[in-house]
Image: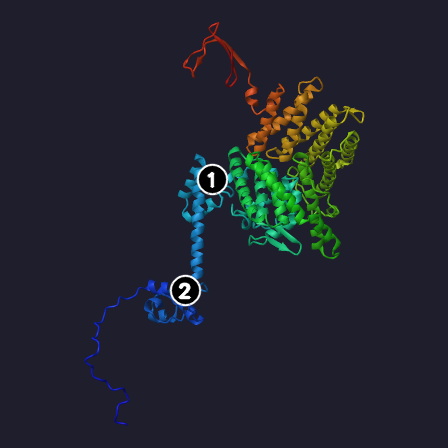
Amino acid sequence: MSGQSAYRPLLPLSSDAPPRLSQAVVPKRKRTQVLSACASVFVPFSSDWLSSNLTNCSDCRKRKVKCDGARPTCHGCASSNTPCAYPLAEGISQREAQKRKLSSISAAHEKSQRVLELLRASHDDGADDILKQLQGSDDIEEAIQSIADASLLLPNNLGRYSQCFDELTDSSTTARDSLVSPSDEIMPVSCWTKISQDDKALTHLVNSFWIWDNTLSHLVDRDLLVSSLAFTDGNTTFSEYGQFCSPLLVNAILAVSSLHATRNASESNSADILTLSHQFANHAFELLESEQSMSSLTLLQAAAILWTFASNKGSHHGRSQCVSLQSLLKKTWSSVDLDGLGSRLIASSRENDGVHVKVCQAVSRMTWGFYCFFSKASTITSPEMLVPRPLVSTIFENLDSQGYSRVDPASHLERAPQSLEMFVAECALCEIAAQFVIESARHEMDGSHHTALYNKLLCWQLSFPDHLMTDNNFPSSVLLLQANYDFIALRVLSSYLRHANTDVLNGHNVASLQVGHASSMMTSLWTYRGIYQIRHEYWAAEYCFFVVQDLLPRLDSDTATFTVRDIIGKACCIINEMVIAGVSGRAQSMLTDIEKQARASRRTVPAYGRQSARGESRPMITIRGLRVFDGEEDRMLDSPVGTFTVKFRDKIHAVD
C-alpha cells in the first residue's frame, strides 16, 4: 500500500461525455455593486480593527502598511523620514468628523442666506455698509458670520449700526452700569437666542427690562432668571422649585427691551433697533408654537410679555395674536397654578434655608405681579382677562435691598425700599380695579357701589407714601402709578354717569371730578414724557386714548373749555409722538379713531395734538381771481364769474 498513491486515480475521458464549454470571460464586479448588495447586511467589525483603521496615518494608508498610530509621528514615518499626517483629529471618528463638517457647511449656508436676505431688505445706506464690511474684511467667513449674527446692530466698530447703543443717554447708561456690579460677569445671553452673539449688548438689554418696564418686570424674578442664564447649554433649566428660564422667555424679554433701547437713539438707529426687536419677537413666536402645548411658568411669563408686544402693534395680525395669547394666558395660568405653588412653598418653609425663602418670596411677588397685570389688562380690554385675587400672602414685603432692587433711570441710585413700597401700593390699587371690573361685569354697579369704589380710591391716594412724591427726581414708576390711579378713577366716574340718576357724587359735580382726574393724569404723563420720553408705553397710550374719548363730547361746551382742550391736546400729542417714533402701531389706529370721532361729532381736535399738527399750524392762504385747470378732463373749469377762489396750506384745501 505504501507504493500506491493516496490520491484518486484519473480516468480517461469517455466518448459519451458532454463537450467542454469554452471558458467565458466574467467581468469584474464593481465596488458599488458589492456595496449595494451588502447594504442591508450588518457586518460586526471588531473594535481592534476599527481603532487601528482610524489611527492609520495618510502615508501608511497610501503604502498599505501597518501603522502604530503614534502622534505626532508614527514609527513607520519616522523610520522612512517622511512627513506624518493624520486625516482625523485624535479621538474623533470618521462619522463624527463628517457630522461636524456637515454641520459647519449648513451653518455657513444659513448665515450666507441671512446676509442675502439682509441685503435685500436693507436701504441703500444699509446695503452699502454691509458691502463695505465684506470688502474690507480679511476673512470673508468671519465677516459673513458677524453680519449674519446681527452684530452690525450691536457691537462697536461696525459702521453706523455701532451707534445704536452708544447713543443712549448717560443716565440710562449709568443706570445699566450700576445695575451690573463690577464683580459681575457678562451674562451668556447669546446661548439662549440665535439673533445675536454679542453678550455685552444682550446683557444690557436684559437689565433694561427691569429698569424701564414697571408692569412686565414684576412677572419675572431677576435673580432667578440671572442664575438660570448661567446654564450655557441654551436649554430650559429646571430646579427642585421649577423652571425659571427658557429660550422663549429670553427672546420675549429681549424683544420688549429693544423697544426701550429706542428711547434715546437717533432716528436711523432707532429703526435698526426696532428691526432687531421684531427679530427677537418673531423668534419668540416661533418658539411659542412649539412650546404652548406644555404648560410652564416661563410659557406664562413669555405669553404675557408677547401679549403686550402684540397689543402695541395695532395691526390685524397683532390683534389675532392677542386673541390667541389671551386664551393661552388663561389656560396656562390655571394649569401652572402659581398661586397654589406659592402657598405650598410657604407651608413647607425651611427656616435655615435662605434659597428656599428667596424662592418663596420670588413666587409670591410674581403671583401678585400677574394679578396686577391681569387687572390692568381687564380694565382696558375685556373682563375675561381678570383672575381671582391670589391667596398667597405678600411675603415679598420682607425682602431686603439685595433681594429686590430697581435702578431709577434718572437718579442712577438703587431704590429698593421705595420700589417695594410702590409695588405694594400697586397691588392695593389693582384690587380696587379688579373689584370694579367684577361688579361691572355682573351689572351690580349702582350709585352706592360707585361711591364706595371712588371712596376706596381716595383712601388709597391719601395713604400713598408721601416721601415717594416729595423727591426731586420724579421716579418713572411713581408717575405711571399715579396715571393708573387717575385712569381707574375716570373709569369709575364715567360708569357712574351712565348708571346713576344724578351727576353729583359726594357733593361734587362728576364732570368737574372727571376733568380734575384727567388733568392730574396728563400732568403725570407729561412729566414722564419730558424726563424719560414716551415711545411705546402701551398702558400710557391706552390712558390717553380713554381720556380723549371721555372728554371729546365736552370739547366745545361752556364748562372748562380751555382745560378740556389742553387735556385732549396733550393726550393726542403724546399719541402722535408714538406714531412719529414708529414704535407703536397701536398709536396710529388710536389717532385715526380720534379724528373719525371728532369729524362725526363736528368737533375739532387741537392742532398741536393731531397727526397733521405741522400742517394745521400753518396759516390758511386764500387767493382769489384764479382760473383752474382740470387735469382729469383736460380743460379749464367754467365759472359764472370767470374765476375761482382757492384756499390751501401745504396742499389745496378748497376751490370755490
Q: Residue 152, image x and y in percent?
A: 48, 42
- Provide the secondary structure element on which disc 2 rests: loop
Write down the quadrant of residue 78 in the picture: bottom left
Residues 579 and 341: in front is 341
Residue 474 visible within the image: no
**What residue is rendered at 50% in x and 43% in y?**
156
Indicate left or right for 608 with 196 as reference.
right
Q: Residue furthest top?
A: 641
> Which numbered mark, 1 or 2, is in the foreground of this view?
2
Residue 141 visible within the image: yes
- Provide the secondary structure element on which disc 1 rests: helix
Q: Amino acid at mark 2?
A: Ser
Label 1 sits on residue: 159
Q: Are marks 1 and 2 in contact (CB under 8 Å)?
A: no
Position above or below: 84 against 324: below
Position above or below: 231 against 60: above
Q: Residue furthest left?
A: 15
Q: Residue 539, image x and y in percent?
A: 64, 35
Residues 518 and 642: in front is 642
Q: Residues within 10 Å of mark 2 (few under 14, many from 20)?
A: few
Q: Residue 306, image x and y in percent?
A: 59, 41
Label 2 sits on residue: 40
Residues 537 and 27: in front is 27
Position above or below: 631 against 228: above
Q: Residues within 10 Å of mark 1 (few under 14, many from 20)?
A: some
Write down the quadrant of residue 512 in the picture: top right
How far apart are the alpha carbons under marks 1 and 2? 56 Å
Q: Amino acid at mark 1?
A: Gly
Q: Residue 77, image x and y in percent?
A: 36, 69
Position above or below: 200 against 607: below
